[in-house]
Amino acid sequence: MILTVCMSPCTDVTIELDSLNIGKASTVKSRSISFTGKALNVAIGVTRLGRDAYTTGMMYNENGYMFENALDKEGVPFTFVWNKGRVRENYKFIDNRSMLTEVNDIGEEVSKEKAEELLSMVRMLSAKSGVTVLSGGLPRGMDAGYYGKLARAVDSRSLKIVDTEGERLFSALNEGVDLVKPNLEELENTIGRHIADKEDMLSACYELLDRGAKRVLLSLGKQGAVMTNGTDTYYCKSLNVAVNSTIGAGDGMVAAAAIGLESGADLPHILRSSVAAGTATVMTTGQVSFTKEKYNEVLNNLHVNKI
């Protein structure tokens, strides 16, 4: 089983407009709502690939039932730590030039008691899991050091994947992590410098390895991805496809990587399957994850090269 831990769920409201008129009225062309969160998306991706997933994390009393309904439809079992208030709502406005404007909610605060309750939940559930995925942000007011506590709570027999950035990532790396999956921007934000070329990119990946990661899966967006363990490094170029949505692409990559780790796959296999899942996600309209059919179609056309 693959366990995913969602600290910061969100309702994504995507609104298409003819134009975004600041200070004036704008007319909505279409509106869609997704009940999401990075770790929830990972669990859905794992399930769509036919493997067992389970998700836990923080949830909120006023509208959390909508997330339960969405997970039920995907066949993902769950147990949440419930908090007062509402799940935060993020708004994405897309105009006729495909320009994206985002307005992100700050969400509710979580009590120390609830934070401790979740750590106990992770200890219990990770003991039954081959891989545990920690991904996304943290609730308002929660210190980045909580990621280290989460990583420490994961059972020693469960492999750990962490998908976050900055001090949250560093905190988790102090406890040792089997795989991290930044994208290029997140990697720059984490190490605090611009990455100018391939040598810079690999050097930054090695920094994460030195800090406690065993493997780095670096997403390069439409260019594909790189994966390294410090000894061997591989590159997989993505296919040139129509991008319908970038929402959940990184989470699709993590889902495939988690399955690969649980199966004992080598770096080239994990990299290739991750790029296939990420690419299949961006090709999918109106969903936070991919279909297995699209995943297989992409996978059969990808190739991995050693750097």
Image (cartoon, rainbow, N blue to C red):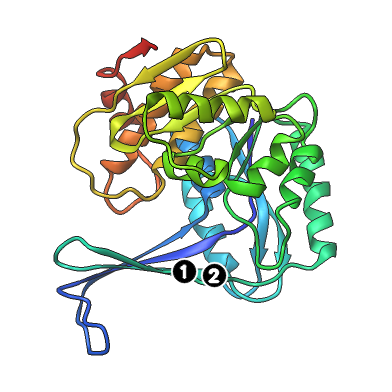
Q: Residue at x 50, y 38 (%)?
A: 182
Residue 224, given in percent of the width and then of the height, sits at 33, 29
Q: Residue at x 60, y 58 (%)?
A: 8
Residue 49 appears in the rendering: no
> Mark 1 to mark 2: distance in Å?
8 Å
Name the one closer to the observer, 75 or 92: 92
Number of the label disc, if any, that sits on residue 104: 1
Residue 81, given in percent of the width and then of the height, sits at 73, 59
Q: Mark 1: few, some, or many residues within 10 Å (few <14, many ≥20)?
A: few
Is residue 149 shown left or right of residue 172?
right
Q: Quadrant of residue 307?
A: top left
Q: Earlier in the sequence, mark 1 or mark 2?
A: 2
Q: Residue at x 52, y 54 (%)?
A: 37
Residue 171 appears in the rendering: yes
Of badges 1 and 2, nearer the viewer stands 1
Name the one closer to the observer, 231 or 6: 231
Which SS class for mark 2?
strand
**Residue placed under numbered mark 2 in the picture:** 88
Amino acid type at mark 2: Arg
Q: Residue at x 68, y 30 (%)?
A: 211
Which SS class for mark 1?
loop
Is residue 59 shown left or right of residue 106?
right
